[in-house]
Image (spheres, rainbow, N blue to C red):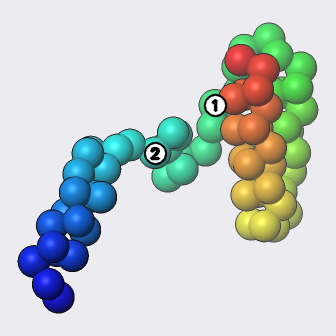
Amino acid sequence: MSASVKAANQRSGEGNSTAEPPFDISTPPTPVPDCPACSDLAALRHEALVRGDGAAETDANVLLRRHQRRDH
């Protein structure tokens, strides 16, 4: 790789190494107290967990995060 390409690649990555994700996906989102939509989505997640349906549980987490970003 030429020196100019290496320099361009390095410049394009500058400032990105400390970027944080918009939310932590390693833990499930926490419902906002007294929010009916959050409560409904948390209930869906719990039902999926009890059934052992990991896909539905993940879907409920995605919907809860989307709701929280949009409405809270």
Give the farthest residue toward the bottom. Answer: 1
Q: Residue at x 89, y 20 (%)?
A: 36
Is 54 on the left-hand or right-hand side of 43?
Answer: left
Q: Secondary structure at mark 1?
A: loop
- Quadrant of the frame with the C terminus: top right
Q: Position of residue 33 (x, y in %)?
A: 72, 14
Image quadrant of residue 54?
bottom right
Residue type at numbered disc 2? Pro
Q: CA distance from mark 1 to mark 2?
A: 17 Å
Residue 17 can be seen, yes or no: no
Q: Position of residue 45 (x, y in %)?
A: 80, 47
Residue type at numbered disc 1? Thr
Q: Secondary structure at mark 2?
A: loop
Give the mark, 1 or 2, whose residue is nearer the N terminus. 2
Q: Residue at x 38, y 43 (%)?
A: 20
- Quadrant of the frame with the N terminus: bottom left
Give the farthest residue toward the top. Answer: 34
- Residue 47 against residue 30 in the figure, above or below: below
Per the image, the residue denoted by label 1 is: 30
Q: Position of residue 34 (x, y in %)?
A: 80, 11
Disc nearest the viewer among 1 and 2: 2
Give the farthest residue toward the left. Answer: 3
Per the image, the residue denoted by label 2 is: 21
- 55 and 66: which is toward the camera: 66
Q: Residue at x 75, y 38 (%)?
A: 66
Q: Position of residue 67 (x, y in %)?
A: 79, 32
Q: Residue at x 51, y 39 (%)?
A: 22
- 50 and 31: which is toward the camera: 31
